[in-house]
Image: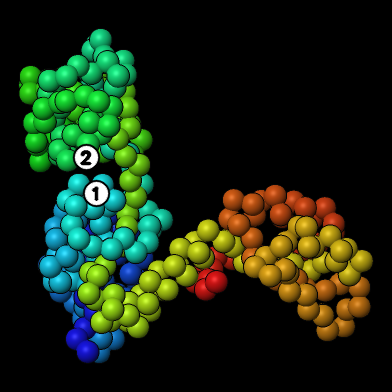
Amino acid sequence: MSALRIALPNKGRLNGSAVRLMNRIGFSVPDSSSRTLLAEFSKGRYQVLMARALDIPEFVEMGAADLGITGLDILLETKRGVERVMDLDFGRCRLVVAVPDESSIQNVSDVKDGATVATSFPNLTKEFFQGLGKKVETAEVSGATEVAPRIGLAEIITDLTETGSTLKLNHLKEIGVVLESVAVLIANPKAIEEKKIRMDEITSAMASVMNASRKRYLMANVPKDKLTSLDTLLPGVSGPTVMNIIGRDDVVAIHAVANEDEVNGVIAMLKGIGATGILVMPIDRMVL
């Protein structure tokens, strides 16, 4: 069987997180400063191809890569014939509609038919306004969309934003959301059948890393007479694990998994029932 090839963004907002994800599942992928475009792993069983995020859906559709990581915004814009395998836990942003601060347009419903919208996402933009019953013209740009109103190209833009700070710096205000985007793992439909075992290895590994990133492993010494409280405090994956401590009849050691955003509250509750030696540790992977 030929190698399973995975395409990763070679630069931009998705690059760093995609490389870190691959590193966590055992692939020492070069960072963006490297000139390596194709690397082999596991004695040639896997290959990693570095490419533009915009090109990755096409590469996966054409079979140049079996799997790829790109943005949902790019996937929906390019309309390539690929499978959306899973959403990843990074690359969150919004494709928004924005106008200059001084514009009289306060909402997308105020946009008039025939208005020109500057964008790098003409398909998504047209579909969005068509859904509102509006016909707009698009002025396609490849970058620096925020400058379009200042140079008279268009009064309206659609552009990606994470926090909205870039829009504010360019004196633009958000008036609508076209799409909530996230990084996605996509696959070539033919490869899903022909390379299922290797593909499942990769998707399972990625899922285990994402599961682990939202969890923490807790250990603590708890008075035996407080064990009845643990089912509520530490549900874990299938309930906390309780172990005896040599030389102690009054205290047991408990191990459990907790949601990251609940850890501080759990620690406070454990201390409240007299727990000691509380340890909180990250989890590398978690297979459910």
Q: Secondary structure at mark 1?
A: helix
Residue under label 1, please give it: 76
Query: Does the image show residue 88?
Result: yes
Q: Going by the image, does 31 lie left or right of 228? A: left
Residue 12 appears in view: no
Looking at the image, which is closer to me, 148 or 29? Answer: 148
The answer to the question of whether label 2 and label 1 lie on touching residues, with beta carbons closer than 8 A, is yes
User: Disc 2 marks which residue?
Assistant: 124
Chosen colour scheme: rainbow
Residue at (71%, 55%) from the top-left corner? 267
- Name the foreground residue: 240 vs 54: 54
Identify which residue, 250 or 255, lies in the foreground: 255
Q: Residues within 10 Å of mark 1 (few under 14, many from 20)?
A: some
Question: Where is residue 146 shown, x and y percent of the image?
Answer: 18, 29
Q: Position of residue 88 (x, y in %)?
A: 38, 58
> If the image is split into quadrants, where does the C terminus sit?
bottom right
> Residue 259 is drawn in which quadrant?
bottom right
Q: Amino acid at mark 2?
A: Leu
Q: Which sits in the foreground, 179 or 169?
A: 179
* Residue at figure coordinates x 25%, y 86% from the top left: 45
